[in-house]
Image: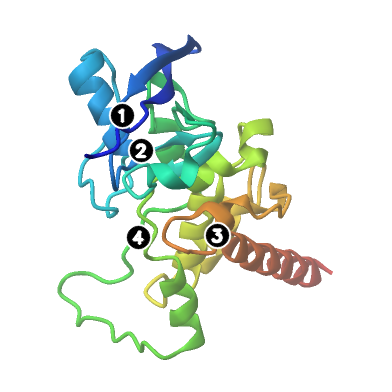
Amino acid sequence: MTEARANMMISVWRGMGSTGKFETFEVPAQDNQTVLDVVTWIQQAADPSLSYRYACRVGMCGSCAMMVNGQPRWTCRTHVKRVLRDNQIEIAPLRNLPVIKDLATDMDPFFDKWVKAGGVHRASRSRDMPIQEVKPDTAQRQAADNGIECINCAVCYAACDTVSSNRDYLGPAALQRAWTLFNDEKVVDKQAVLDAVSGSGGCHNCHTQGSCTKFCPNDLDPLGSIAGLKRETAKSFFRRGSKQC
């Protein structure tokens, strides 16, 4: 005889905008169950009005990111057994972002800062020119490649306490993108990258707590990228000062 499994008590944030509350659902426990499976079960079997976001379900796109027991996670990668506490789990929308409804957040502020940090690549060659050779074994190329796997899931943004206390702060993902472009040999105007991240809300607002690197699902190092920007913007400041003397 198969032993009956106890149901889990799942608290899910419900609401729109800045108002809402947690609602508890009793969800059947199953083998190899992810947090996204739990949310999907609630939407399909208990309350079809529950709003949330997901796409691939296989740990590739990052669109299913939510707060699980107060920590940002890709819910499709997070197995229930890892986060179940006293037979309970708390699920909420990513913090530091406006809530559209329930578990779905508005990503516009995140991407607006990504653009503000100079995250859009501006080509230095026309389509009529030969393709620029990129040597993969240089230190500069390695620095650029280290952050190129960022898929803008906003987990690092949700994990960042500096973003919580300073709404002007560009955030780890945007600054990591700027560091990638700064080290990209195809980007000619390096100073423009530094200028974009050295002002109010830029890299020097980082408190070096490291939550961005700790929680990155792709094992990237935004903290290291921000440290690189701090070094280069400081060098740029002193170079400009010496030229004025």
Total label count? Answer: 4
Q: Which amino acid does label 3 sit on?
A: Pro
Badge 1 density bin: few <14, some 14–19, many ≥20, Cα 10 Å: many
Determine if residue 116 is in view.
Answer: no
Q: Do the residues labelled 3 and 1 touch (CB within 8 Å)?
A: no
C-alpha span from label 2 to label 1: 6 Å
Earlier-in-chain disc, 3 versus 1: 1
Q: Are marks 2 and 4 in contact (CB under 8 Å)?
A: no
Q: Are marks 2 and 1 in contact (CB under 8 Å)?
A: yes
Earlier-in-chain disc, 4 versus 1: 1
Badge 2 density bin: few <14, some 14–19, many ≥20, Cα 10 Å: many
Picture coordinates of residue 161 (x, y %)?
A: 66, 39
Q: Which amino acid does label 1 sit on?
A: Val
Nearest the eye: 176 or 240: 176
| Residue bearing mark 3 | 222
Q: Which mark is residue 35?
A: 2
| Residue bearing mark 1 | 39
Image quarter of residue 188: bottom left
C-alpha span from label 2 to label 3: 26 Å
Against 34, residue 40 (above or below) is above
